[in-house]
Amino acid sequence: MPLTTFVTTCRRWAPPLLSAMLAGCATIGQAPAFSSFVVLGEHGTAVARVLIDAPACPEIVIDQRPQAMALRAPAATLALRSTPSAPADSKPAAFPLLTCEAPLPASASHASVLGRALPLPTPAPRRIVVIGDTGCRLQKNSHSYQACNDSAAYPFAAIAAAAAAWGPELVIHVGDYHYRENACPDGNAGCAGSPWGYGWDAWNADFFAPGAALLQAAPWVMARGNHENCLRGGQGYWRLLDPRPLLAGRDCKLAADDATGNYSDPYAVPIGQDTQLLVLDTASTSWKGLKPGELGYDKYRDLYRKLDALAQQAPRNLGIAHHPLLGMGADRKADGATVLLPAGIQAMLSGHVHLWQQVSFASGHPSQFIAGFSGTAEDTVPLPERLPDGVTPAPGAQVEQFSSWVDGFGFMSMERLGADQWLVQVHDQQGRVRNTCRLDGKRSRCALAQVK
């Protein structure tokens, strides 16, 4: 190809929006910058996803055979809709790039896009990274402005790099990717110049740019958090992350469709040894509780019934839900109703609370792990080393073991030791191990009651 032709192509694929990421585009022979990752969905189906500012979706090469990628979502600026903020503190969500996708056959041994290899699923992954609550909080309503420009105050990029270096075969994100909701106040050097709102620039700054190393390291299971409900980052979640088809009416574009867009059925991801991950969408639950007759109350009753049916497909299950149903400080329903998890769930993996926590029960409940400590401003209220007698997250749940890490950033790893046994370790942002736990059946025990 003549030099002049390549330069023209490079410029067409690299408009100014991504110029900070595309310094190498001027180098002859270098591919344009883009985000690429693999997300696992229902039945463990793997989907290659590419986000690129280009005139058309690129080809994907699977086992040396090029094929077209499908357009999941075109570039668009979505009309301003209701948000938690006043109209003056909101703006339309702009996505000036294509979302492209292609299914990956289970038999594939290699796949790449524009010369970049994609991480392929392992049928029975033994090394799993768990992260959650990774965005940088900019929220006017709570007067909370995290120092996004300070890598010590917002260390997600370092955490993602350390987690990638650990060598995972699967990454689980337990929800809350997007936090840059409102503009940084004038004069605040900690977040000055940060993008904000619910469009691509904020999503890129909060997740795709800092998480790039981990996105390329392994396939992901992406749970949905409350920051991805339709009032907030739901448009980006459906467009960019969810593994299922993007459907009109379920895309959070119109407030009139929120009764559909705010809820989605649970799904199962097999991970070998008769075990599956059960992914539950809790984006629209409320700390205020849900009462009989309310939309959310009826929706979640239906979703829990479906979760129970999925759990019966395998003897072992790990549940993934953003809200920690069995964690200390978890919210209870206003009517006093208790969520009864299926008997086949060994442990719950959650976020929402900005710390790391482990709870094990003598009452037959699954262990609860909370990994909401991967970037968002931390909760700093201390927890006791030993819970007072009678303290429980749910009626009938008898706490046997409890461990926590408050005000520390990092990621959690799970390494499979046997059919029912996992080695669970807590890593800081440099990747150093700060606590070690064993999960055996539904019960878990950690070396330290508190990480200090």
Image (cartoon, rainbow, N blue to C red):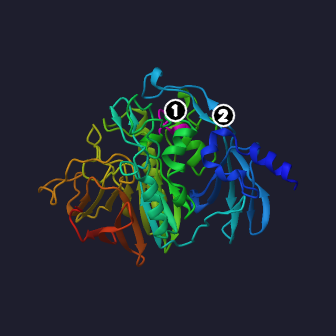
Quarter of the image where one finds residue 113: bottom right
Q: Is residue 158 left or right of residue 434?
A: right
Q: Amino acid at mark 2?
A: Ala
Quarter of the image where one finds residue 397: bottom left
Using the image, determine if residue 362 lies above or below residue 229: below
Q: Which mark is residue 76?
A: 2
Q: Is residue 419 left or right of residue 52?
A: left
Which residue is identified by label 1? 258
Quadrant location of the C terminus? bottom left
In the rendered image, is residue 312 in sight? no
In the rendered image, is residue 341 in sight? yes
Quadrant location of the N terminus? bottom right
- In space, the residues marked 1 and 2 are separated at their CA atoms by 20 Å
Question: Magenta residues?
Answer: 229-235
The local secondary structure at tag 1 comes to helix
Residue 350 spot, x, y in % from top left = 38, 54
The local secondary structure at tag 2 comes to strand
Using the image, determine if residue 155 lies above or below residue 117: above
Q: In percent of the image, x 35 and y 29: which residue is there?
A: 141
Queried whether the magenta region covers residue 130, the answer comes back as no
Name the one closer to the observer, 124 or 37: 37
Q: Residue furthest right?
A: 2
Q: Which secondary structure type mostly characterizes the magenta part of the structure?
A: loop
Name the one closer to the observer, 239 or 187: 187
Name the one closer to the observer, 309 or 243: 243
Residue 437 spot, x, y in % from top left = 30, 70
Residue 11 spot, x, y in % from top left = 75, 44
Using the image, determine if residue 51 lies above or below residue 414: above
Q: Amino acid at mark 1?
A: Asp
Using the image, determine if residue 405 lies above or below residue 153: below
Quarter of the image where one finds residue 54: top right
Q: Residues within 10 Å of mark 2 (few under 14, many from 20)?
A: few
